[in-house]
Amino acid sequence: MATPKNSATQAAVRRTSTRSRSATAASKSSAAQSATAATGASAPASQASAAAAAAPSIKTSTTGQRKKVSLALQGGGAHGAFAWGVMDKILEDGRLEIEGLSGTSAGSMNAAVAAYGLIKGPEGAREALHEFWHSISKAGERFSPLQQTPWEKFFHGWKIEHSMANHMFKFMSHTLSPYQINPQNFNPLKDVLEACVDFEELEKHSKTKLFITATNVRTGKARVFDAPEVTAQVCLASACLPYLFQAVEIEGEHYWDGGFMGNPVLYPLFYHTESRDVIIVHINPIERPGPPTAIEDIFNRINEISFNTSLIKELRAVAFVQKMMDEGWIKDEYRNRMKYVLMHSIRADNAMSDLSVTTKFAWQWEFLTMLRDRGRAYAQQWLAENYDHVGVRSSVNIHKEFL
């Protein structure tokens, strides 16, 4: 079915689009201040969300030709709401046209929902993303095993790592397999996806190039599904954490989370889009200060490193090709066959520094919108500092930041 167009959703999206400024200097100053405020680790979630929501939204003039870009969206559970905010700001700003989307795990769902919404234009994509994440929150209220007692809500808000349900959930998920805990293989995300995305319409009418990655359990290889192949089942496969969900079967093969082999996969955006510009929207921090000491933080850092490994390997290959082209290693007759890719990066290291791994399972609307607002602030700052680089040069130093 099509994305619901209820008045509440439309109003919520439009509220972020009603104010504008034209001075570039003021734009940069506001963006920097917003990003700083949005990442304050000591601020309560409600204050951070309110501050970002209250900040004037800059609606940039779209006179002239829009620049085409592709977005590569990482996964990270509920932390994917940060990428929602990044996309929301890019769509609202209007100077960039999203030609391609590559996503893994939560990034696959953001990508599929955005591609579907873009059938009706940027505002359609914003409304679709808002509706999807609101539906995630509602599903969490009904089905999440991490429910808090009134006492826990009063003292800890959305910080579910302190709840008794969280301790029980960790014990169960590390003791029993999903085939034992959930033999009926119930996954409320399937209903949410099918309610928010008409996959048949997506296949027939989407002009956005869409790529979703899942990991083949048998071969250990990544499989990239393109737009005609994308279904709710494909998105669930891309987000299938093996200790929480049964492997997803597609065409006789079983799949786990795509993040094991590509978080996200970049190469389809190099080969199948016209744009040279690829913006990576990070969810998993590349760097963290100091070694973790708590066992939960140690496991979380192991997960972050392993899920970033494939991305860093692809970036190494990009840097190598750039070096060959820059230094004239490639003969002229072959040079025109290669695309000089321009890389950009919206990092989440600081944005996620105050969040525990448990919050990847958070579903509270207050928490999700807080992350959305952080993402909007980071995107606003990135646009102010790097928009002029799009189509001209990379805005990220791959060697310095990733290698």
Image (tube, rainbow, N blue to C red):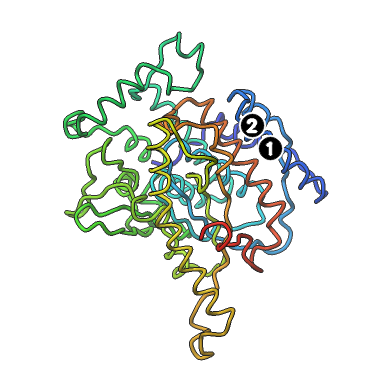
Which part of the image, by quadrant, shows the N terminus? top left
Foreground pick, 170 / 268: 170
**Which residue is at 64% across, 24% downward?**
47
Q: Is residue 153 left or right of residue 235?
A: right
Instruction: Please state the horizontal and vertical placement of residue 312, each as a whole percent of the image.
Output: 45, 58
Query: Residue 36, which numbered label?
Result: 1
Give the vertical position of 347 relative to 33 (above or below): below
Instruction: Please state the horizontal and vertical placement of residue 325, each as a whole percent of the image.
Output: 55, 79
Among the 4 quarters of the image, the one containing residue 192: top left
Instruction: Please state the horizontal and vertical placement of residue 88, each as a whole percent of the image.
Output: 58, 44
**Which residue is at 64% across, 37% downward?**
14
Disc 1 is placed on an element classified as helix
Q: Which residue is mark 2?
A: 40
Furthest-top residue in view?
A: 151
Foreground pick, 400 / 213: 400
Q: Could you give the CA–CA distance between mark 2 and mark 1, rounded to whole angstroms?
A: 7 Å
**Are the residues flagged by discs 2 and 1 in contact, CB closer than 8 Å?**
yes
* Amino acid bearing label 1: Thr
How many neighbours does mark 2 have within 10 angstroms: few (below 14), some (14-19), or many (20 or more)?
Answer: some
Q: Is residue 240 left or right of residue 302?
A: left
Give the vertical position of 56 relative to 336 (above or below): above
Q: Is residue 179 left or right of residue 319?
A: left
* Amino acid bearing label 2: Gly
**Which residue is at 22% across, 44% downward?**
247
Instruction: Please state the horizontal and vertical placement of residue 372, each as a whole percent of the image.
Output: 56, 36
Q: Is residue 390 left or right of residue 295?
A: right
